[in-house]
Amino acid sequence: MKNQNWLNRMGKPGYFLLLLAIPILSLTIKNIGRKNEKQYIKTVTAKYDVLVSTITSIGTVVPKTKMSIAAELTGMIEEVFVEDGGMVEKGQQLLKINSSLQHEKYLLTKKEVIQTQLEVERVQKELQRSESLYKLNQISEKELDELKRKLSALRHVRTITQQLLALHQTKTEKTIIRAPMAGMILFSWPLEKGISVNSGQHLLSVVGADGVNIETYLNEDDAVKVKVGQEAFIKNHLLAADSTLLKGTISFIAPEIKRGLVKVIVHADDNFHMRLGSSVEVKIHLSALDRALVLPVEAVRIFEEKTYVFTIETGVVKKRQVVIGNNNHQFVEIISGDKVVEGIKVIVSHFDEISEGMEMELHEDR
């Protein structure tokens, strides 16, 4: 009854204050008990190691061997003997182009050759007759020399027109386009009978059956770190569940930089099979040439645009400024630091609970 009367006299406000006071008092008692208790945190030991970083890029599956075929004549496609994606043998007929313009050039040049030959023969006979007249002193030496020069010029013209005729004949014979090697046909655009084409226009390609490469582009900063013959790894990035990495080798690095990028060709392993044009992920591992003092990335703190680490020295927390270098997203290189040397203990946990000067018990290094 006395306890009940006491609570009644406090009223509801006093009752709620009492409820709030109990947990606060409990926390205060715990904090008093922990005042002299040392914190337990996780640390690592700074050590020298080889810092391995990885360059990752997206590449495209391209043929290892590819020959482009362009029209050598201006004309119209008369026949298409193959299908896009079909396999062909070397020398197999691919297309036939009907070029009336080229045939006309051939006939006109042939006519010119015949006319020039007839003119050469006429002047030769005239020269023979003039030589006889010259011996009889019936024509001058000057007239004889003029005929000789005329005959020489005609012979030169005849040689040129004969060469031009041979060129036109070769082009005329190329109305039939044949496969330069065995492989798969890839049309540049739909090729059908009746389509007009121009000389030099790209028509199709023949892809060799000797495997595929991966074509990728690296930014110029990364490109200078790789070299021909270096190992690379290939993954189908469209299949996230497939973690299989196939080996490859860098076979080509373009000497020029275009829009800040450098073209790199990776020779794929013979076991690599993907459709041409597919996208893959290319990983190239880079190793530092020299051993570096490294720490986990999470050990480094940034404050006011400067980098720091917290160390444990004789059981006391010290805040040490450091200069960092390369990283591979797991470990970072420590180029220099205030007393940050090999073997020192560095904190990697509880950063929001620690400050310089605190006493700490060391947790087992990971």
Image (tube, rainbow, N blue to C red):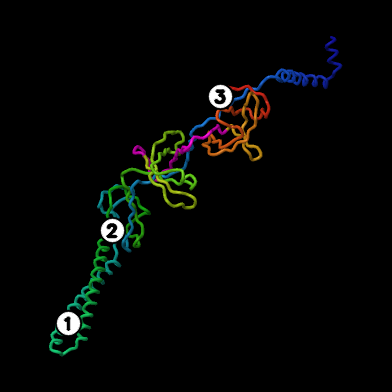
Direction from residue 283 to residue 27 in the image, left or right:
right
Write down the region rendered in magenta. Answer: 269-297
On the image, the x and y values in percent for residue 138 come to: 15, 90
What SS does tag 1 mark?
helix
Q: Is residue 319 above or below residue 187?
A: above
Direction from residue 262 to residue 109 in the image, left or right:
left
Which amino acid, by three-letter code, is at mark 1?
Answer: Leu
- In the image, 117 versus 2, the foreground residue is 117
Mark 3 highlights which residue? 365
* Residue 218 marker: none
- In the image, 312 versus 146, the foreground residue is 312
- In the image, 86 versus 301, the foreground residue is 301
Assess disc 1: are there few (<14), some (14-19) or many (≥20) residues with their C-alpha within 10 Å of its C-alpha.
Answer: many
Assess disc 2: are there few (<14), some (14-19) or many (≥20) residues with their C-alpha within 10 Å of its C-alpha.
Answer: some
Mark 2 highlights which residue? 96
Q: Nearer the viewer, mark 1 or mark 2?
A: 1
Could you tell me which quadrant the C terminus lies in?
Answer: top right
* Residue 127 marker: 1
Could you tell me which quadrant the N terminus lies in?
Answer: top right
Q: Are marks 1 and 2 in contact (CB under 8 Å)?
A: no
State the CA–CA distance, disc 1 to disc 2: 48 Å
On the image, the x and y values in percent for residue 258 come to: 47, 52
Which amino acid, by three-letter code, is at mark 2?
Answer: Lys
Pointer 1 or 2: first along the chain: 2
Can the viewer see residue 196 in this picture? no
What SS does tag 2 mark?
strand
On the image, the x and y values in percent for residue 144 come to: 19, 84
